[in-house]
Image (spheres, helix red, strand yellow):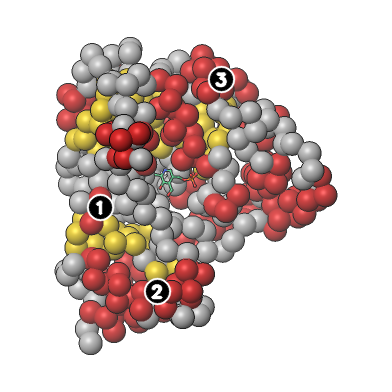
Amino acid sequence: MKNLVPPHIQAIKPYEPGKPISELERELGIPSSVKLASNENPLGPSSKAVRAMRACLKEVNRYPDGGGFELTRALSRKFDMPAESILLGNGSNELIEIIVRTFLRPGEEVVSARGAFIVYLLVTQAAGGKNVVVPMKEDTHDLPAMATAVTERTRLVFIANPNNPTGTWVTRTAVDRFLRSIPAHVTVVMDEAYHEYVSRRSVPDTLGYIREGRPVISLRTFSKAYGLAGLRIGYLFGPPRHVAEMNKVRQPFNTNSLAQAAAVAALDDERHLRRVVRVNRREKRLLEEELGKLGLPTLPSEANFLLVQVGRDGGEVYQELLRKGVITRPMGGYGYPHHLRVTVGTPDENRIFLETIREVLQP
Ligand SMILES: Cc1ncc(COP(=O)(O)O)c(C=O)c1O
């Protein structure tokens, strides 16, 4: 079998998702654990989204609208972007794959940062591309170094803003300068999965670049602040000519009807979104403070998670927390062997996490 598979596929290290609560129960018999591992929204989806899904349950015998007309129109109105600049995906992960399959020939290069979202590397490798990985500076994308890494063979640059797992961000000034130095054969993908949580004004408005006609793609998702991770629905904004090509590459029915309906309703529920963002901000600050009191530094984060330095092997601390029913995420694979990534949960979940990590680290 192995001989049938090309070496660049054999070399892929599978993505390790956060452990589902049900798996912990199955494997260790631990009921009602706390999951702070996948940057999900602990408050759940908007009730309007749930209602919208219920209303279309009886029609799941029909294929979905492959072009996602209603959702595209709702996004177009909300963000004042033409429908031709929007593409829907089965989560933004699928859109990352569609981007790479559209723009990259085997052997061509994709630039990303060490310690950025790992899916860029996996998808590029699967497409027979070459990953050019640039070290971060102070746990942040080093855009001047990334610009220097661009060659004749570069087709794509991925920048996660804010980045997962660090939570750090790049500023408008840095992105402006970066875009000025990027040649015309390169498309820059700004992955903005955590966009709704951002409060700093220094973070750039990527849609402005797209309106100016620059070769920039903005990736967004309903998985995080909108609380629809289980439905797999994301979207991107990009130059219409780019979007038209990507549209040919996607599967005809890549987003399902329940997800489309829920996303339209979720977009409309600004009150729920505001509450989600408010609770995240408050709880993130409390978590930072309490972790600081335990002597555990965190990086400044504009997202819904914190990268916590635990002062010991992060994999071991992860396992010990797991045995006590708290699921976090070890970050050795991202170059942070002494860290855990912890999603900001509800007040109760955060309290349980803090009590448990105290037990583990200060027995
Ligand atoms: C930076 C970043 N991009 C993309 C994704 C993928 O999100 P989804 O496929 O659920 O939209 C994630 C999920 O964790 C992420 O952190």
Q: Quadrant of residue 233?
A: top right
- Which label sits in the foreground, 2 or 3? 3
Q: Earlier in the sequence, mark 2 or mark 3?
A: 3
Tell me: 346 left or right of 191: right
Residue type, numbered disc 2: Val
- The residue that mark 3 highlights is 248
Residue type, numbered disc 3: Lys
Q: Quadrant of the N terminus?
A: top left
Q: What separation in Å lies between label 3 and label 1 (alpha carbons)?
A: 34 Å
Q: What separation in Å lies between label 2 and label 3 (alpha carbons)?
A: 43 Å
Neighbours of disc 2 within 10 Å: few (<14), some (14-19), many (20+): many
Neighbours of disc 1 within 10 Å: few (<14), some (14-19), many (20+): few
Q: Earlier in the sequence, mark 3 or mark 1?
A: 3
Q: Quadrant of residue 291?
A: bottom left
Rendered image: mark on residue 326: 2
Q: Earlier in the sequence, mark 2 or mark 1?
A: 2
Compare residues 96 and 123 and report the one nearer the observer.
Answer: 123
Asked if residue 265 can be seen in this view, the reply is: no
Q: Secondary structure at mark 1?
A: helix
Residue type, numbered disc 1: Gly
Look at 25% across and 31% down and name the residue there: 131
Q: What separation in Å lies between label 2 and label 1 (alpha carbons)?
A: 20 Å
Circles 3 and 1 in contact, beta carbons < 8 Å: no
Compare residues 5 and 51 and report the one nearer the observer.
Answer: 5
Q: Is residue 244 above or below residue 311?
A: above
Q: Secondary structure at mark 2?
A: strand
Q: Quadrant of residue 37?
A: bottom left
Compare residues 25 and 156 and report the one nearer the observer.
Answer: 25
